[in-house]
Amino acid sequence: MLKHIRNTAAIAACAVAAASTIAAIAASASHGTNEAANESTNGDAPEFTGIDQWLNSEPLTLERLRGKVVLVDFWTYTCANCINTLPAVKSWNQKYKDHGLVVIGVHTPEYPFERDTGNVKRAIERFGITYPVAQDNRYATWTAYSNRYWPAFYLIDKHGKVAYAHFGEGEYAQTETAIRNLLAQK
């Protein structure tokens, strides 16, 4: 009986610890102010690599986009959180594309059916996405950014440095302020 009580207590303690860890990860990812976001803003932005298809655009490189502010949005078309961010991303694209912002969606699939270019094209049309989308089926660009989240925003300044990162939904005003500040820099 004592052994059963000890095992039950140990299982309960593990469950509480796991729930706390999951809650902390979810809270930090949804607020975009976690350590991972801060660590992601420490240097040169990785180049787009291993892209299977470019949709809505010819292939782009960060080198060619030097002098522009670039918003790299890692997403996938069945992710509810990614879908929830699309109105903000599309709005930023419309508001700031003529002022030096280039939005690039990096579609990195979570499920095998999301690798199909036809499915991605239909999703782009359904969501009204007009900015370039890079299909990253092999996670090459995802890996180059050391990304771990859907959705994830990386703002790259005019000099090619990652200046801001946000993971998850929310803090749209903070992200838009970062966009405006980077566009205002000489």
Image: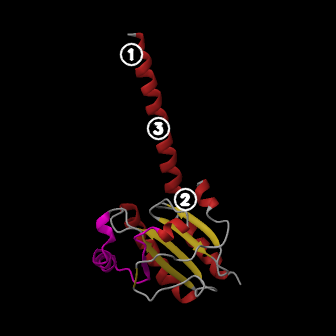
Residue 185 in the image, given as x and y percentages of width and height: 69, 81
Q: Do the residues labelled 1 and 3 touch (CB within 8 Å)?
A: no
Q: Quadrant of residue 71?
A: bottom right
Q: Which amino acid does label 1 sit on?
A: His
Q: What stretch is highlighted in magenta?
A: 112-139
Residue drawn 43% across and 87% down? 57
Q: Earlier in the sequence, mark 3 or mark 2?
A: 3
Label 1: which residue?
4
Is residue 120 covered in magenta?
Answer: yes
Front residue of 94 and 77: 77
x, y (%) of residue 39? Answer: 64, 59
Identified at 44% across, 62% down, the residue is 150
- Amino acid type of the residue tagged 2 in the rendering: Gly
Image quarter where the C terminus lies is bottom right
Which label sits on residue 32?
Answer: 2
Q: Residue 18 carries which label?
A: 3
Q: In which quarter of the image is the N terminus?
A: top left
Task: Residue at 45% x, 38% y: name it.
Answer: 19
Q: Does the magenta stretch include residue 2?
A: no
Image quadrant in which you'd find residue 53: bottom left
Amino acid under label 3? Ala
Secondary structure state at the residue bearing disc 1:
helix
Q: How crowded is mark 2: few (under 14 residues within 10 Å), some or many (20 or more)?
A: many
Give me the C-alpha separation between circle 3 and circle 2.
Answer: 21 Å
Q: Is residue 144 left or right of residue 110?
A: right
In-image side of 181 versus 79 (left or right): right
Marked residue nearer the N-terminal end (2 or 1): 1
